[in-house]
Image: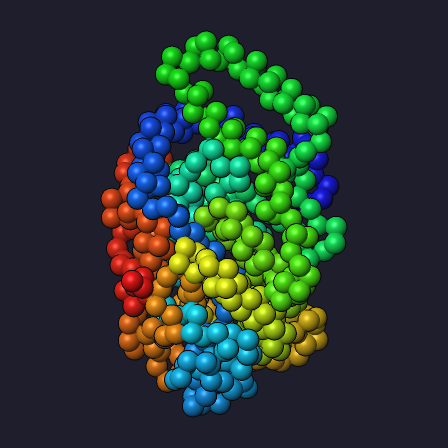
Amino acid sequence: MQDQWGRREFLRAGLGGFGALSLPGLLRLRAEAALKADQNHQSQQGSPEKTAIILVWLRGGASHLETFDPKPDAPSDYRGPFSPISTNVPGIQISELLPKLSTCADRYAIVRSLSHTGGGHPAGSLQMLSGDPDAQDKRVPKYPDWMSIAHAERFDPSHSIPNYIAINPVDRYDSFTIAGPTYLGRNYTPFQVVGDASRPDFNIPNVGNTNDAQRKRLSDRVGLRKHLDHIRRDIDHLGMMQAMDHFESQAMNLILSPEAREAFDLSHEPTEVRERYGMNQWGQQCLMARRLVEAGVEIITTEFDGPLCGRVSNWDDHAVNHHVFDALQYRAPFVDQAISALIEEVYSRGLDKRVLVVVTGEFGRTPKISHVASSGGGVASAAKGTVQPGRDHWPRAGSMLFAGGGIQTGQVIGATDARGEDPISRRVGPEDFLATIYKHLKIDYNTIAPLDFTGRPTPIIRKGKPIVELARQS
């Protein structure tokens, strides 16, 4: 959150959404509350330690050829200037731009055969995050994203920290909204952390507030709100107001909890650990994600975009935006350091069975290199008018990385053809990706069907199966 936010703005963001719940939303909450409580209890009884996911989202779409699916034998107008390097797993090679990740390939699996039909950033993102099969871009999502669904299924108001936290949120692409709870309701949006956590002045205002005077003022304000609700409660024959108390309770827990402040506070980490991730925005986002899963948070997303990407602040490496190879060479060290450190710590700190790390974006990039005049100079882009190489949108093929989660690591799943244009084995679609996530989170994607805006049950998976090659180890 931005430093200039004060108590009023925080309360508006943290508590205001509860009062804005619609009547159908409140009815749905009331109807689901008892069932969810029972399901959560049964889940906790059967699983002493809940699973969690960290999603690292490469907004704009990373080139699979320059990351996890190099094609050194492709024609010159396809292969690019970088060579593959061997990893610590015999037979697996990745781009030379990722030397640190090459040393820990035994701790992750690569899927090289992701393929779908969403050729625009919004459509590709919606397919990946919510399973929307539509190939056309939309201004807003039709279906809730997997993070909101998982948050709804695992919601527990007793937690002092929200169960879904977005560190540099995965929510928008320019003017398009690419993720959100849609008909689940605003109460399942994430707690958002924005800003550069590597800056010395970074902070999240009002979280874990331990000042007695401020705590009293906050309690007085909430008490006043409850007093003003008295009339509404008198006519609340269905008890709908009680449903809001759960969400207000969690917001208050976050504001007042010293445990929450500690979980977000990276200054508790030794300097050498912070430097291991990289003293930059992406590195510290990944370190915060690790701290949060250790604090019990189960759904964490973090987006890699902004200045570390280059001139246009994302991975959309059209020639008009970036010199694609300069851009990848510029950002690769930050990615390589942050992701490799996160993976290594997930294992060294004993989180590797519980926490699944996923690295992906909305699609890959065109295997054939284009050459177009730059629209402007800057980091990783030549002066305006200079013709430079680029790679465009390519939903037909892309790569994903999975680590931790008790999966079978040290393997490559699927393959693309000699030019990297299309899968030739083990095609994986967005709903296979989502089913894999739901399986790890122990969410029954075959039976869960939230009510949409018309009151119609809507499956969270319409087709698709978990990636069986990632099957949990015994």
* Rendered position, 235 above or below 449: above
Asked whether the viewer can see residue 153, the reply is yes
Picture residue at 54% right of the left edge, 50% below the top: 292
Seen from the viewer's position, the closer of residues 129 and 322 is 129
Q: Residue furthest right?
A: 201
The spot of residue 187 in percent (x, y) is 47, 35
Seen from the viewer's position, the closer of residues 278 and 41 is 41
The spot of residue 403 in percent (x, y) is 43, 65
Question: Can you say which quadrant of the picture contains the N terminus?
Answer: top right
Protein image colouring? rainbow
Seen from the viewer's position, the closer of residues 100 and 241 is 100
Asked whether the viewer can see residue 320, the reply is no
Picture residue at 34% right of the left edge, 81% below the top: 417
Based on the displayed image, in which of its 4 quarters is residue 222 positioned?
top right
Left/right of residue 244 with respect to residue 273 in the rendered view: left
Based on the displayed image, in which of its 4 quarters is residue 82 positioned?
bottom right
Give the number of callouts.
Answer: 0
* Rendered position, 23 above or below 319: above
The spot of residue 281 in percent (x, y) is 64, 60
The spot of residue 215 in percent (x, y) is 67, 27
Picture residue at 49% right of the left edge, 46% below the top: 297
Left/right of residue 181 with respect to residue 291 in the rendered view: left
Picture residue at 46% right of the left edge, 33% below the top: 157
Question: Can you say which quadrant of the picture contains the C terminus?
Answer: bottom left
